[in-house]
């Protein structure tokens, strides 16, 4: 009886210990990643008619997010998923091309790069984008009534040029500067506008926020060093290494260019021993570097990375480790 009691007590202690271990990991993971909450009971209308969203509207940090796939259907657009680059390409009903990536605040709109104030997110394998930005890029408008939980979507038809109403008149009608309207439609001057031309008149807010450009040379160089340092790591590890270099560029303690960060100091021996020149970035590295250059950062403020099994000493042990991904610790 005593033996059975002791055995039972031992089993209970082991079970309790396992439960504690299981609980600790999810809690820390949840604390590190904010979740977009479902906004329940929302009524959605499109041009005054009720429509059903198969996936719910969500909210994150006070911003509404909508499921991209369903929104493209509602606005008569078409979307395609690029599995190799993890990009969602949308063609709206009026010829605009939109390219979105999860966690990447830069959107490609008709081939140009613009910065959204918040990035698309992935929930249960589905892409969500900031509602207002998405609606405007689909050539529509949105009204949100928080008290009534009413979401009103409106598709805006292009304005057709006539003999009586040209670029000047249409720009006044829609309260848009003439030059901006011309640029929005790929027109160089008013003389290019002929009667019968359909003009896109919705001006997405993000068009006023062009993303900081980068050169092909910087892209290739950053990809080469990322391949040397983390080609064997996961996409997340590669993204982190690329961002350490970009974080240094923004940090006054380090050089101001990608080239100078890589070639100065001793952290990147490959820049001095010939390995960098021979580096051939793989597909995952190319994707990670592009995403990093477009603002996706999973190691904010980290300006060092090192393998704790290899790099020893007071300098490395004195750093504040932000996170560890694969074989590398990332620190500031």
Image: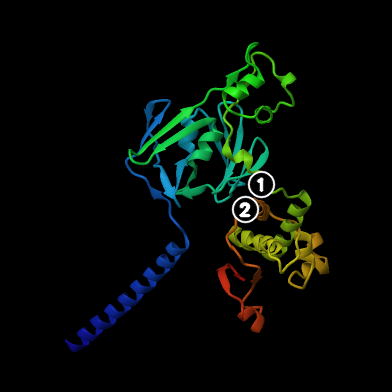
Percent position of residue 44, x then y: 38, 34
Question: 199 or 124, which is in the foreground?
Answer: 199
Q: CA distance from mark 1 to mark 2?
A: 9 Å
Q: Which residue is mark 2?
A: 295
Assign the C terminus to one quadrant of the image. Answer: bottom right
Residue 89 visible to the viewer:
no
SS of the residue under disc 2:
loop
Q: Which residue is mark 1?
A: 211
Question: 164 or 131, which is in the foreground?
Answer: 164
Could you tell me which residue is drawn at 71 percent across and 48 percent down?
A: 213
Extreme-top residue of the structure: 163
SS of the residue under disc 1:
loop
Percent position of residue 217, x then y: 79, 52
Assign the N terminus to one quadrant of the image. Answer: bottom left
Q: Is residue 150 above or below residue 270?
A: above
Is label 1 or label 2 in front? Answer: 1
Q: Looking at the rendering, which quadrant does residue 182 occupy?
A: top right
Percent position of residue 156, x then y: 52, 25
């Amino acid at each position: 009886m005593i033996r059975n009691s002791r055995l039972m007590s031992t089993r209970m202690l082991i079970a309790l210990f396992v439960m504690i271990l299981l609980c600790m990991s999810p809690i820390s993971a949840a604390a590190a990643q904010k979740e977009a909450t479902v906004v329940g009971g929302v009524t959605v209308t499109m041009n005054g008619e009720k429509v059903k969203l198969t996936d719910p509207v969500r909210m994150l940090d006070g911003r509404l997010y909508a499921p991209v796939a369903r929104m493209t259907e509602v606005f008569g657009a078409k979307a395609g998923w690029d599995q190799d680059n993890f990009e969602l390409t949308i063609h709206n009903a009026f010829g605009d091309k939109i390219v979105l990536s999860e966690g990447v605040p830069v959107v490609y709109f008709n081939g140009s790069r613009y910065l959204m104030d918040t990035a698309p997110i992935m929930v249960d394998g589905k892409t969500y984008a900031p509602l207002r930005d998405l609606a405007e890029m689909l050539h529509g408008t949105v009204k949100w009534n928080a008290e009534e939980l009413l979401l009103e979507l409106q598709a805006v038809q292009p304005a057709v040029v006539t003999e009586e109403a040209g670029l000047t008149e249409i720009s006044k009608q829609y309260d848009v500067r003439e030059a901006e309207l011309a640029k929005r439609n790929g027109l160089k001057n008013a003389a290019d506008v002929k009667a019968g031309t359909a003009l896109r008149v919705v001006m997405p807010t993000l068009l006023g926020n062009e993303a900081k450009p980068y050169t092909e040379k910087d892209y290739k160089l950053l990809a080469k060093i990322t391949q040397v340092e983390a080609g064997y790591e996961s996409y997340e590890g590669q993204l982190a290494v690329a961002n350490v270099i970009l974080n240094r560029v923004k940090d006054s303690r380090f050089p101001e260019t990608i080239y100078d960060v890589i070639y100065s100091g001793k952290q990147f021996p490959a820049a001095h021993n010939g390995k960098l020149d021979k580096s051939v970035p793989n597909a995952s590295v190319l994707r990670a570097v592009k995403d990093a250059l477009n603002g996706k950062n999973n190691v904010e403020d980290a300006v060092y990375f090192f393998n704790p099994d290899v790099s020893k000493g007071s300098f490395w042990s004195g750093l504040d480790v932000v996170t560890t991904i694969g074989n590398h610790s990332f620190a500031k």
